[in-house]
Image (cartoon, rainbow, N blue to C red):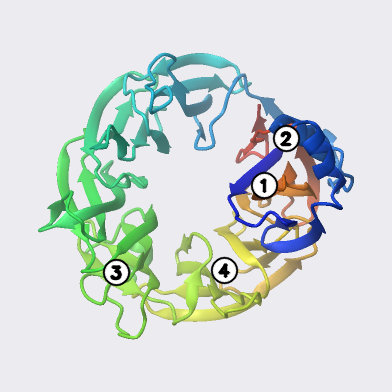
Amino acid sequence: MKNVLFVPILWLCCIILVSCGKIEQTVTVEDNPYYKRWIQSEMNIDDWLDISSEVPGYKGLNNINPGKIKEIKADIDFFEYNDIMEKTKDGFLHITMKTVPGTGTSQWSDKKIPLIRKLSSEGKIKWEKEYDYLTVSGYITNLIVYPDDGFLFSMQVHPYYTDNKQVVENSILARCNSMGDMVWTYEFPDISGAMLKKVLVGENDEIYVVGDWGMKDGVQTQDEVCDSIVVTKFDGRGNLIEQKGFGGSDFDNVENAWVIGDGSCLLPEGSKQEPSPIVIQGYTQSHDGDFAIGDEGRQRSGFIACITENMNVKWVFFPEEDIDFNSNPFICDEGINLLCYERTGNDSFPGSLQKVGIDGQLLKKTDLYHGMWGHFISGLSTGDIVAGAGRQNDGIIIIMDSNGNEKKRLDNLQYEPQNIFPINDGGFIITSTRAKKSVPQPPLISSIWYDTELLVVKYDNQYKIEWRKTYDRYVGQMGLDFAWPQKDGSILVP
């Protein structure tokens, strides 16, 4: 699989090969044999792909015990980057955006509609449904499966311009039964294109939709205003209960959000306080409002906030100055665990585990690593906590007990541990898109070109490698590889 990122430049006198921010090679145009051959081929970009594919230096990882892997082949012919796959009682749900030919214009390519596929436990398509919401900019942001295999999904849109006029499409929230039939829908006139970042379902089937909008006097506006965070609450039948904006006079943006059951894990035992069912993670530049930065000299800060079921901010946690969040928090009975890093102005990026208690106060900080970018933190069925970080085909996994005390460290991994999937047996599966080799880029652009493979690794409950396999369906061409690990340790692959 070959990925490319293009960035225009003005200087054509040299070629700089860059991978993940590190300059690996500098050669002049005259000395570059690949450039000379490309000129002779009349500078066709497809010829460049063929020429650059001959560059030596593959460093793909070997498979380990591939015979132990339970692979489920999905009978699906195409994927989008924002596709979501979720487990059901007797199979899987796959949601994507399908292109509708003939719906494009001179300014925009063909429009798309949501498409849901139900797969059997063997990966075969049982049925598929298309939904008549034709958009230019739509993409899927959430898919939630209910115990009866009914489901809820959201499609986010972005404003776009045609004939010098702004067009605002509607984002949608849709509830369907187990056969994919629509039960109800709610359309959001989404001026900001960010109102449906996260959808959550509470203990009593209430639904919280969390995102950003431009707010004036408590409602959405097209005026030039700073972003605020918006939470929209529905009952389980799709009836709007409340929509409320949160923030101050500067920018406030949400990154992620979680529902916490009835909120009891963040309340003292026997407490009579109002439950707090939502935790949101975001960033603020405001020195007033709901997430006010106390230090006037501090221009921007990440935060964690607890919002009650009555849509009130209960508390807000700010990390120390120059400390920022590296990944999504992991929430457990003892509080909220955060993987953080320090903005040092160099490449050291000191990483730490920070635990926030039931009242929003910092309980403990544990230094973990330097020089890497944190990717995940999660809990395992054993009660342990696992954190992963990496950089440029190097990585580390740290296993800790529930109090954050280190139990085991796995380093020199030869890959960045990017995603974690806890498994029922107490182990976990890691997926990572890994660079196999750097590829010289054409001399008329500055770009990051590299050939990649998808790496899937299963660790057992003693945190040793049980099996490992690489996937690369797109050798020498553009494309993305996918794998969806399951709780039973199997993986669903195309």
Relative height, residue 91 to residue 56 (above, below): above
**In which image quadrant can residue 345 be found?**
bottom right
Residue assigned mark 3: 270
**Amino acid type indicated by mark 2:** Met
Position in image of residue 380 (x %, y %)? 60, 56
Residue assigned mark 4: 402
Q: Earlier in the sequence, mark 1 or mark 4?
A: 4
| Residue 202 horizontal side relative to residue 29, left or right | left
Alpha carbon of mark 2 to alpha carbon of mark 1: how far?
A: 10 Å
Relative height, residue 298 to residue 26 (above, below): below
Residue assigned mark 1: 444
Q: Earlier in the sequence, mark 2 or mark 1?
A: 2
In contact (CB < 8 Å): disc 3 and disc 4: no
Residue sitting at x 21%, y 42%: 234
In contact (CB < 8 Å): disc 2 and disc 1: yes
Label 1 vs label 3, nearer the camera? 1
Residue reaching furthest right?
Answer: 56
Alpha carbon of mark 1 to alpha carbon of mark 4: how far?
A: 52 Å
Q: What is the total number of numbered labels drawn onto the structure image?
A: 4
In contact (CB < 8 Å): disc 3 and disc 2: no
Residue assigned mark 2: 43
Alpha carbon of mark 1 to alpha carbon of mark 3: how far?
A: 67 Å
Alpha carbon of mark 4 to alpha carbon of mark 2: how far?
A: 57 Å
Q: Earlier in the sequence, mark 1 or mark 3?
A: 3
Q: Earlier in the sequence, mark 4 or mark 2?
A: 2
Residue 68 seen in the figure: no
Quadrant placement of the C terminus:
top right
**Amino acid type indicated by mark 1:** Leu
| Residue 97 horizontal side relative to residue 4, left or right | left
**Amino acid type indicated by mark 3:** Gly
